[in-house]
Amino acid sequence: MDGPQGQGQGQGQAGRAADPRERAEEAKADLLQEEEDISSDYGSRGKPATALGRAVPDGNVLLPDIFHTDHLLFYERFKAYQDYILADCKASEVKEFIAEYLEKVLEPSGWQAVWRTNVFEVVVEVVDVEYSALKAVVRLSEPFLCESQVSTFTLECMQELLELKERQIPLRELWVVYDESGEFDQTALAMEHVRFFYQHIWRTWDEEEEDDLDYFVRCVEPRLRLHYDILEHRVPSGLVADYQNYLSQGEELYRKFLNVRNSISSSDSDSEVENVSMVEGLQLYEKIEHLKQKLKLIENPLLRYVFGYQKYSGLQAKGQRPTGTKITHVVSSTMMAGLLQSLIRDKLCPESCGEELEIQFHNDPLAAVSACYDGDTVIICPGHYVVDGVFCIADSVELEGYGLPDDIVIEKQGKGDNFVDCTGANVKISNLKLVQHDAVEGILSIHHGKTTLENCVLQCETTGITVRTSAELLMKNSDLYGAKGAGVEIYPGSTCTLLDNGIHHCKEGILIKNFLDEHYEIPKISMVNNMIHNNEGYGVVLVKATIASDVKDASATKESMGDANVKTEENMIPGVLTDLAVLRMTFSLFPDLGNTQPTLSGDGRACEEGFRQEELPECVTDELELYEQVEISEQTEGNYEIANELGAASVKKNQMRKKRLSKLGITEADDNLMSQEVFVSIVGNQFKWNGKGSFGTFLF
């Protein structure tokens, strides 16, 4: 969409110095010429023909066909509103500019249209157009053609209704009857632009907004983009529902506000009733402004996802049931007798279970998870389940597939939503295959608490797993692939343990977010026996901010070493990933590192032991012992380089913290505070066939 936007803006800027009305008139003339050129490409040159399609009414044959115009692309509407209709107008000038546009392109009479309301549809003939009022003067067509859900709309009733309306109908309620000649193409398109504008762009309160800003830039473009993002399922369904709800609330409150304001302005007395009305008006105004700010957040493509993230991260846990019982939810599209017997034998009546189980059956895994309380278990039977929504898990719930992951597939529909959002204290997911298609959000986001993922297959579309600050992930024996971003994103202050997994065919394997900022905590990372391969970029990437002191130190190191092959931040383009040479000189950049951690020895064993912390999670202690004597090979060389770089970053973080404390006059800090180093245990991982190597850092 950037292309159409740039094209439209380029044409809009061409005459910026000229009067906006002159620009609009010139643009309208160009539009007419363009449509004439388009029409000449259809049919023979000697016989005009329409360039628009035909829309056949559903379910009836009495009414004639109409022009098919509601399928216009984003750039077509964008260009029409920016260059031909609204130009640089202010909010208070919108109606006037639209009227001038219609006066240029709309046929004043002689065409038929279908007048549509929620109750009836009737064919009328346009005899005149009131451009300033955006209305058409009409009469009923002959013969009389009308479709209605009730039989009371006779010819006499419609004549009476038209007389009450003074035969003037809003243009947005008229759909132009199809004509093959091409004579009314511009009329049909103009009606579509007006109708779309007042249905999806215009707000009743827009006219009272600040009038010193370009209305198109401030309101039309973001709302138009949001409309098409929603059409293409690129906005989470929850945000779409919220947006529609806020719009409805805003319109209702604004109507009340106008009534209160009109009652005050029409009253000349200084009565107590008027004072009460003024207070009510102020309260309504504040509510309206609050809703408008929420709408603008969702309309802004950058702030939209921050708003959505805050929404999901604030999920409220249900806690335990009031009765204190825990329920086992069984999900199956069809329940056969043999499957039920196996479930009873293996899961529902285990010998170790000394109490009666309460069981609920579902045919939709999303419904089963939504029905869960703290401590519940969901058992999903083999099958292919297609869901349209988000798995929001805010309680300690266990999701378990009954069988192999490839036999229990949950496929996500809808581009805008996350797949699974976890905020529960202890969530467990096992033996499932999660599949995304055409998504724009990640497959699994852990906002709070601990999530254990075991023996699962994740077929991603954008980002894979996101471990947010203060969240914890334990991923074991799982396979993740297909992410167009990183397979696993690790945020500052999080805990991430990866054991015996495959992460492959992603943009990057694992991405560790920058944690050197003073407001960030150091993440705790353990990686054991993972196979990270066939990723487009690096196997593991550390994001770091470029610091001026680092550039100076690196430059001095380069001069002292005299090594032309060593790259520093000074001779690198910001945002470009460093190569292996920078990683091998990391310890020489930070002299204090040698006093706190063992340096990289010839075989790398000292480094491995130096970064092995004592306080390992209980769940991985036994497994780590299996890799005490791991052999050094070319395939596992990345383990030591990752540990080196994370260790160096950790020391740098502590140096920065000491410096801040020193400025505050604190010379002796708590040992626990000063020893917050990256909780690294990186052993036995294999890095194969990654496009740029096993490990790199991204400087920004």
Image (tube, helix red, strand yellow):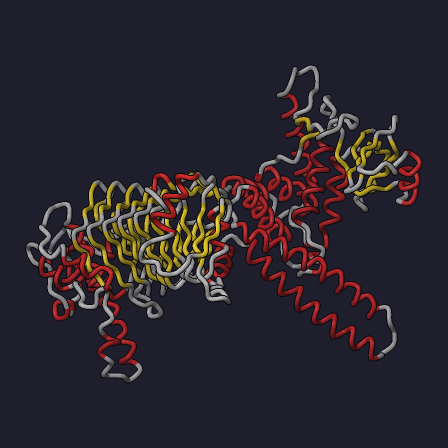
Identify whether 248 is placed above or below 197. below
Q: Position of residue 532 (x, y in %)?
A: 24, 46
Left or right relative to 317: residue 109: right
The vertical placement of 399 against 85, above or below, is below
Q: Which of the 4 image quadrants contains residue 421?
A: bottom left
Residue at 37 percent across and 52 percent down: it is 349
Residue nearest the viewer, comparing 683 with 318: 318
Between 582 and 453, the residue placed more toward the observer is: 453
Q: Is residue 77 visible?
A: yes
Q: Is residue 437 above or below residue 316?
A: above
Going by the image, does 432 lie left or right of 683?
A: right
Q: Nearer the viewer, residue 74 or 381?
A: 381
Residue 484 showing in the rendered view: no
Q: Position of residue 689 (x, y in %)?
A: 21, 40
* The C terminus, quarter of image: bottom left
The answer to whether residue 519 is above or below residue 358 is: below
Q: Residue at x 54, y 50 (%)?
A: 237
Q: How far across and how far down the image is residue 220, in percent?
A: 62, 49
Question: Residue 499: x percent and y percent?
Answer: 24, 53
558 or 333: which is nearer to us? 333
Left or right: residue 627 versus residue 672 is left
Residue 506 location, quadrant: top left
Q: Total marks drawn?
A: 0
